[in-house]
Amino acid sequence: MTKIRMNRAIVATLVLLLIQTSILPWLVPSAWSGRLLLHLPFVMTVFVALLGGRHRAFLFGLGFGLVEDMLFYGHMIGAYAFGMALIGYLIGLAFERKLSTLAFVLLLTGVGSGLLDMLVYLIYKLFSLTHLSASFVFYWQVLPTLLLHMLVALALYLPARRFLVRQVVSQSEGTEGN
């Protein structure tokens, strides 16, 4: 049986958030800076949903979504918190029903990333904070961000799994070996 180490997940996400805010802006070309909306805490929310369940992913996404709302997107507080919490819950629900292979993790990361960005776009559109068309936003921002999130999830899958998972020996497994 496995159990997630939430304190390590929070520390790892804070480190990824520092990398996202300090190093990645230097690595992304200036022509692409408006297109790539990298959310490393979202990728960690997917891993928490995989390893810790839907309720932990909901709270994890809500907390780090609020942090991202306060740090980056001052137009409206709560859009990313709502989106990351909802998508984390839904991904956690999907992981309860299906085997968690790498391909399934990448698929749900991509779908979740697309849903998150489109959900935030729809919230901004609802409150007239953007006047861009949905097709333009999808091809200009959502699709490149989705592919980048899948690439980051592929790179972080094994290290995150090794760093966040703790093996728990149950009472019955411990006595069988004697």
Image (tube, rainbow, N blue to C red):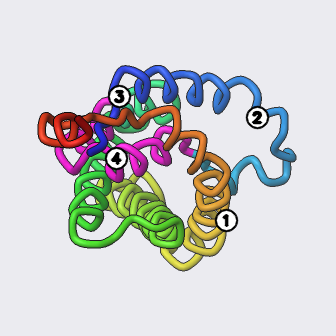
Q: Which residue is mark 3?
A: 5
Q: Which residue is mark 4?
A: 51
Q: Secondary structure at mark 1?
A: helix
Q: For residue 64, which quarter of the picture?
A: top left
Mark 2 or mark 1: whose residue is earlier in sequence:
2
Mark 3 or mark 1: whose residue is earlier in sequence:
3
Question: Label 3 vs label 4: CA separation?
Answer: 9 Å
Q: Residue at x 32, y 50 (%)?
A: 49
Q: Which residue is mark 2?
A: 25
Q: Position of residue 14 (x, y in %)?
A: 51, 22
Q: Secondary structure at mark 2?
A: helix
The label nearer to you, 3 versus 1, is: 3
Mark 3 or mark 4: whose residue is earlier in sequence:
3
Magenta stretch, main secondary structure class: helix
Q: Residue at x 30, y 30 (%)?
A: 63
What stretch of residues is rendered in magenta? Answer: 39-63
State if disc 4 and disc 1 touch (CB < 8 Å).
Answer: no
Q: Residue at x 71, y 23 (%)?
A: 22
The label nearer to you, 3 versus 2, is: 3
Horizontal arrangement in the rendering, residue 56 relative to residue 122 (left or right): left
| Circle 4 residues within 10 Å: few <14, some 14–19, many ≥20 | many
State if disc 1 and disc 3 touch (CB < 8 Å).
Answer: no
Q: Position of residue 167 (x, y in %)?
A: 35, 36
Numbered label tally: 4
| Residue type at tag 2 | Pro
In the displayed image of the protein, which residue is found farthest to the left?
Answer: 172
Numbered mark located on residue 144 in the image: 1
Vertical order, 31 against 178 (above or below): below
Q: Position of residue 67 (x, y in %)?
A: 40, 26
